[in-house]
Image (spheres, helix red, strand yellow):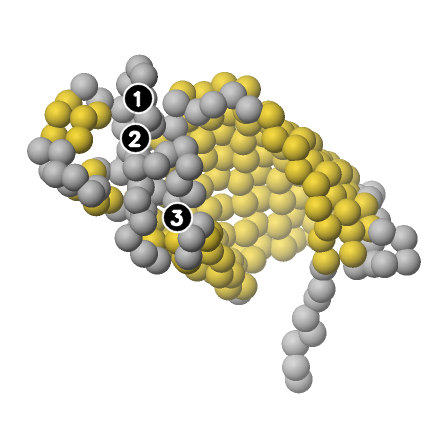
Amino acid sequence: MRVRASYTAWTAFQDLTLAAKWSVLEKPMTSYGTLRTIFVVAAGIPMNDYDVELLPLSIGLGSARVSWRGTVNYQSTPGWFLNMSTAYTMRSKVSLDRPYFYTNDEFVMSDRVDMPNTFDYVASAGYMKPGGLMTSVSFAQQQTLGGGDIRRQDMPFVSNRMNSFRAGAMVMYPIPKLAPLAVHFGLAHTFGGRNVGEATTITTGLQYTFNGSPTR
């Protein structure tokens, strides 16, 4: 089991996420490759009372959440791989700094907003050579299970339905004589969705990989 902690920061600690990952199955399939299944449970909470009505500038949504994710990975002996992953996320209500709001054609006299749960899936395929080149293409889709639409000439609202379809590609290559330091480059585009902007994202950076050895 592996446990991971992460946070998103704006002016201070904003959201804290803890996750536990289990390797459920790892089964060699003769000489062709290995099949793995992974299960992840994650929980997140807001770390302070930040304003959730500054979308799209806000990083988080101010909602506590719990998610379950299942992943199936097939790694072939020559180096080709295929990943398929899906997750369901439950989200708690959030509080506004005002006692009313308007969403989904309804005026509500309350500062508490119901947050719809979300469902997403990701599929990726590529090639990975141990200690060498890694390249992949991926497709991701998110479905928000409820929520209203952004009103004309208005800011996004925290409980808006945010559906999207995104595709991308990534290349990572170890820097000669500086391994395990590697450089990576990524390109992704949001092709369609609902209440989500169509955008192209370009990323580049350095990655350092280290492996811990268990004590005996």
Question: On the picture, is 25 further left or further right than 211?
Answer: left
Q: Nearer the viewer, mark 3 or mark 1?
A: 1
The disc label shown at residue 154, or none: 1
Q: Earlier in the sequence, mark 3 or mark 2?
A: 3
Quarter of the rendering containing residue 131 = bottom right
- The amino acid on which the numbered mark 2 sits, given as a three-letter code, is Phe
Q: Mark 2: which secondary structure?
A: loop
From the viewer's perspective, is residue 132 above or below residue 147?
below
- The amino acid on which the numbered mark 1 sits, given as a three-letter code, is Asp
Residue 119 visible in the shown view: no
Q: Nearer the viewer, mark 3 or mark 2?
A: 2
Instruction: Tell me whether circle 2 and circle 1 mark residues in contact (CB < 8 Å).
Output: yes
Find disc 2 in the rendering and name its residue. 157
Q: Nearer the viewer, residue 13 or 103?
A: 13
> Looking at the image, which residue is at 45% across and 35% down?
120
Quarter of the rendering containing residue 82 = top right
Instruction: Tell me whether circle 3 and circle 1 mark residues in contact (CB < 8 Å).
Output: no
Residue that sits furthest to the left in the current view: 109
Find disc 3 in the rendering and name its residue. 67
- The amino acid on which the numbered mark 3 sits, given as a three-letter code, is Ser
Question: On the picture, is 66 further left or further right than 148?
Answer: right
Q: Where does the image place residue 204, in percent across and percent down from the top left? A: 70, 41
The quadrant the C terminus occupies is bottom right
